[in-house]
Image (cartoon, rainbow, N blue to C red):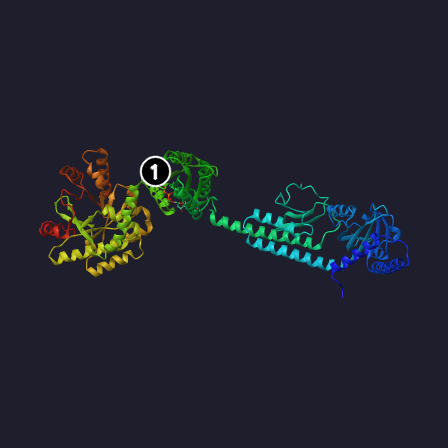
Amino acid sequence: MDQPVSRKRKKRRAALNVRNEAPIPACDTALWEQINQVNTKLTAYIQAIEQVALVSVTDKSGKIIYANEVFCEVSGYSQDELLGQNHRVLNSGHHPKAFFVNMWHEITHGRLWHEEICNRSKNGSLYWVDSTIVPLRNTDGQIDRYLSVRVDITANMEREGHLQKRLNARMCLFEMRREILQASQVGTLRNLILEKLVGAMQFSHLAVSSMLIDGKYYSSDTTMSPDTQHLPTLQGEIRSKHKVRGWIKVQYREPRPFLLPEEQDVIQSASEDFALWLERNETEEYVRYQANHDGLTQLPNRCHMKRILDRLIGERRHNIGRFAVLFIDLDHFKIINDSLGHETGDLLLKEVAKKLTSCVRKEDIVARQGGDEFIVLICNVNSYGDVETVAQKIVEQIKLPFTINNSVLYIGASIGIAMFPDDGETVDTLLRSSDLAMYEVKQAGRNSYQFFSSEMNRLVVEGHRMKVALHEALNRHEFELYFQPIMDHSSQRIVSMEVLLRWRRAGNELVSPGKFIPLAEESGLIIPIGAWVLRAACQQIESWRRQGIEVPRLTVNLSMKQLGTKQFVHDVITILRETGVRADCITLEVTESMLAENTTDVAQKLHQLSSLGFHIAVDDFGTGYSCMALLKNYPIDLLKIDQTFVRNICADKNDAAIVIAIIAMAHGLGMRVVAEGVETPEQLDFLSEKNCDFYQGYLFYKPQPASDIVNSLRRSDVFVSLR
Ligand SMILES: Nc1nc2c(ncn2[C@@H]2O[C@H](COP(=O)(O)OP(=O)(O)OP(=O)(O)O)[C@@H](O)[C@H]2O)c(=O)[nH]1
């Protein structure tokens, strides 16, 4: 059985020491006997050693003066070739210089040296030997030769080495792949690969890894210059999407005659894995970018901006420091689209985005909220004055002409400003506050800026509460009808009554129509409310009729939303059927703007209604388009002159001229005219002199509930029959 290596080594050392150091005793028979025995033993040892080991002796300088047969056999050199050669002829280059420096240091100091060495044979192949070098002294005690005994361990080393290297390589790749799966930052991953590759090399202390990616050089040893082509190099190419993006290298600091294939595999795989990661990361980055940016302007989109805003709020919540949110909406942008086309509109939006970016500092953020709306975050604000300066600059800059496709375009911007934390401490409140302020700018005429105020908020909160209550108002029977008579010019009697809606909210508070009608329009509630009004008006006609009061006609206002519903005419007919009222008992009032909005659909419906017997009136005439040409396409019976003209009719020549013109033109088109808001006898005189047909106003009657007006109606002479 084999003895353990350490015991074998001890024995060998003991034997060599005996040979080198045993003193020669004085001659006597017993002693010679002893010497012979020792000699015999030594000879046996030497013979045995010579059989299995590579034995050589060198002089002080390392020149070989003896080499046994095994030595010749393993090294591939003949004795003649070896003798006189320096031992360096066998150097494989595998070991660093320090390895041999240490060896020489030990043996020149008379110490035995024992290591595993990789040597190179004559044919270039490598072999590993377990080497023991013993310094030999001459009779003066000086070291003058070195005895080397080496055992060939190449087979073991290869087995172990291969396994170890493969294991190392696998481990390295495994770890790198794990990191690659988790890595999110290219810088971190790059450093990690460079570090791991060095660790995976057989002489890691000599290995330097480096990477060239997209023209930039990185190295695990920043002192080593990229210009090291002469050094032993393992290299892998980083290829992504069929393009060479760079390389990964591992180089040894010293020349090495051979490099292991496993190491090359590691570099190759690392390069491929890294290239895949780059591709994946770039795809993810692209997707992330697309999700966070507006495709047209490349600015952060609404979601991204909200996240930025949220982060900013988080940062500033504990630090004192204001920032401002500017809500920017372009003025009348729709006209650009409608007149010059969507593509021109798009180009203008891109130019506006650039201009906005140029108006703010790098740390500020410009985002596209959507459509023609942009958000600007001014991140560091000392005073309102700072923000005002930026807002003013934006208004001025946007006002300047834009040249798009060789055309000069003009646009304005309305800006609402909310400050953090004063006007909101959450993303939603800041956006809402700035939006409200922007809305105020629009209301005030556009092309300017406005800071948010708590009054705006109060109005919004009130509006919201009212909207909620309005939803319930129909179910709670909170609506009432008021009636205001319309008088005949010549007879001074009632020809019709305008039906006016009133909302008596819980608590008996009467809400003015000016407050709730716009909310009902906005929420769409105007459709069921409008149907209720028509039905209630018809029911009232029937109720009066049953009481013996014949009302010639009631005038009911329509909204554009109602008229816009497909089944509007059908719904009106249904109400007439249900209540038993004839169509000619009802005048339907539309506004000028309704006629201008959707001419074909509105005209069709009004013609249908007119042919059913309804009268059609145009309310508030003169305040909108005042376009007589528009009227001729519709079956209009009555024009109602807006009260704003009537109010100053005796004092303002222009108003008087307008009223005279409207009456003349209406008569020319076969229509009759109602003057609204008649309050004084002077107004009445003026109007009757100009042949106005009918009057409505406080001079005759205020709007009254059915219960109050009924007394006036009972007088038999109040009505003029129009039939
Ligand atoms: N070209 C283009 N137009 C868009 C885009 N997104 C929205 N719009 C249009 O932008 C217009 C925005 O209209 P609004 O802001 O409501 O109206 P405006 O004409 O600007 O009027 P005010 O805001 O009241 O001054 C609409 O006509 C949209 O169709 C877009 O990506 N490209």
| 648 shown above or below 141 | above
Q: Is residue 621 left or right of residue 87?
A: left
> What is the tally of numbered marks visible in this picture?
1
Frontmost residue, 239 versus 219? 219
Determine the secondary structure under disc 1. strand
In this view, the residue farthest toward the bottom is 1
Q: Is residue 559 visible?
A: no
Frontmost residue, 224 versus 204? 204
Amino acid on which disc 1 is placed: Gln
- Give how far across and how far down residue 244 sits, in percent: 64, 48
Q: Is residue 428 visible?
A: yes
Name the image quarter holding residue 229: top right
| 512 shown above or below 539 | above
- Give how far across and how far down residue 540 sits, in percent: 16, 56
- Give how far across and how far down residue 256 sits, in percent: 74, 48
Q: Is residue 352 left or right of residue 38?
A: left
* Mark 1: C-beta under 8 Å from nearest atom of ligand 1: no
Frontmost residue, 364 versus 715? 364
- Give how far across and how far down residue 419 sits, in percent: 37, 40
Ligand 1, seen in the image, is in the quarter at top left
* Quarter occupied by the N terminus: bottom right
Crowd around label 1: few <14 · some 14–19 · many ≥20 (10 Å): many
Frontmost residue, 647 versus 5? 5
Q: Is residue 444 left or right of residue 82?
A: left
Residue assigned mark 1: 450
